[in-house]
Image (tube, rainbow, N blue to C red):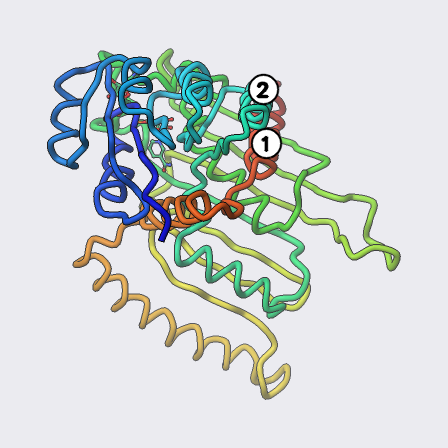
Amino acid sequence: MTRPLRAAVIGAGAISLQHLPFLQRSEWADLVGICDLSPVSAEIAARKFGAAGHYTDVAAMLEQASPDIVHVLTPPQSHGPLVSMALSAGAHVICEKPMSPTAEEAEKLLAEANAAGRHLIENHNYRFNDEVIALQQVIADGRIGPVREVDIRMSLPIRDEGSRFADANVVNAIHSMPAGVLHDFITHLSYLMLDLAGVRHFERVMAAMSNHGGGDLFTYDDLDAVLISHEDVDGPETDSVPVHGRMRFSCRTSPDLFSIVVRGEDGQAATDIFHPFLDVVVARPGGEQLTPIVNHIVNGTSLARSGFRNFGRKLLQHTPYHGLERFLDQTYAAIATDRTPPVSAADVLDAARLVDQIVTAGGRS
Ligand SMILES: NC(=O)c1ccc[n+]([C@@H]2O[C@H](COP(=O)([O-])OP(=O)(O)OC[C@H]3O[C@@H](n4cnc5c(N)ncnc54)[C@H](O)[C@@H]3O)[C@@H](O)[C@H]2O)c1
């Protein structure tokens, strides 16, 4: 094995608790520093996760700890300057989503990384969850035929008392992003949509962003978007087919869910990232008469198994963040061995452009 990468973290807040355990135990990483504006947060995190040093000044950490790779885990508005500093110091960067408020900024940062010969990778963690990988496999195996529709729906009670977005006394920085708090979720919905639809771009994007709960704190609390790709290429001369996407975010439907349905020409597959299962409806032996019955038996059995599996996962604390560890492991392994990381610059830019399209369309009304 090559030597571990010297890893440093900027931002010791909530999401660092998902990155730091990986950095503490991975054989690919050597945790050389943690920086936070709060000296107490930096020191506690350094002690808990065994970092060699703790800092309140990013420049000092970059100079003294000379990391090979830096995780930028601060609020989105601060990402740009911190990513630039880390790249200038010669480090690769893993940046939390959303990497920047606009695709234009993302493009500039990616160009900086390219010029510096470093990787700049946005965290697309849910692409690496077991159930999303299972969906990707169903599609890759051709079980549901060419993909025609992808529905992604997230329900989270972000306006309820106790939510970190609902505190008017300590206003979460995400509220000042172009889509307000929705910006925290749209990147996830966008990279999943592009990945599962198998397209790099949606030609038509119609969207409505609403503030159903009213008030000044939330700019928006609801998203409804319709996306259409490759409208005019459904012909024998091309392999591409038009794909429709539907994206919903609501804070008014419960319980929490993160459901994905992919429909192809020959069947459909569904899962939920928060309540994992895999349901596949395809033509089964027995023809038209028996297909619905066989699908019910197969999927019913699979659903019952998911119940037991999810109970076991709960006991083992296998949370919906498990894809983040897989994303980090594959990214570190790729960088350490000079291979292509699993999230490319094009993936990051395509997702940022789709976010821009949705935010522009959704904010129009
Ligand atoms: N991938 C995911 O599933 C996921 C989940 C939650 C949050 N996030 C993203 O992670 C990022 C951080 O979110 P969070 O919830 O951890 O925020 P947070 O507010 O809990 O933590 C941010 C930390 O960064 C520190 N900080 C801010 N500016 C700094 C600077 N210039 N130098 C050093 N430290 C600085 C703050 O003191 C704070 O401790 C956001 O972009 C958010 O959208 C991603």
Q: Could you say whether the residue bearing mark 1 is in a helix, strand or loop? A: helix
User: On the rendering, which quadrant does ligand 1 occupy?
Assistant: top left
Quadrant in the rendering for residue 70: top left
Residue type pointed to by label 2: Lys
Residue sitting at 41 percent across and 33 percent down?
Answer: 94
**In which quadrant of the rendered view does residue 292 lie?**
bottom right
- In front: 176, or 21? 21
Residue 208 seen anywhere in this rendered image of the structure: no
Depth order, front residue of 286/173 = 173
Residue at image position (12%, 27%) is: 44
Q: Which residue is mark 1?
A: 349
Disc 2 marks which residue? Answer: 108
Whether residue 33 sits left or right of residue 186 in the image: it is left
Crowding at label 1, few (<14), some or many (≥20) Cα neighbours within 10 Å? many
> Is residue 144 shown left or right of residue 343?
right
Q: Is residue 254 above or below residue 164?
A: below
Residue 33 left/right relative to 206:
left
The disc labelled 1 sits on which kind of residue?
Leu
* Viewer-proximal residue among 348 and 281: 348
Q: How many marks?
A: 2
Q: Residue furthest right?
A: 237
Q: Where is residue 7 shown, x and y percent of the image?
A: 31, 33
Q: Is residue 175 above or below residue 340?
A: above
SS at circle 2: helix
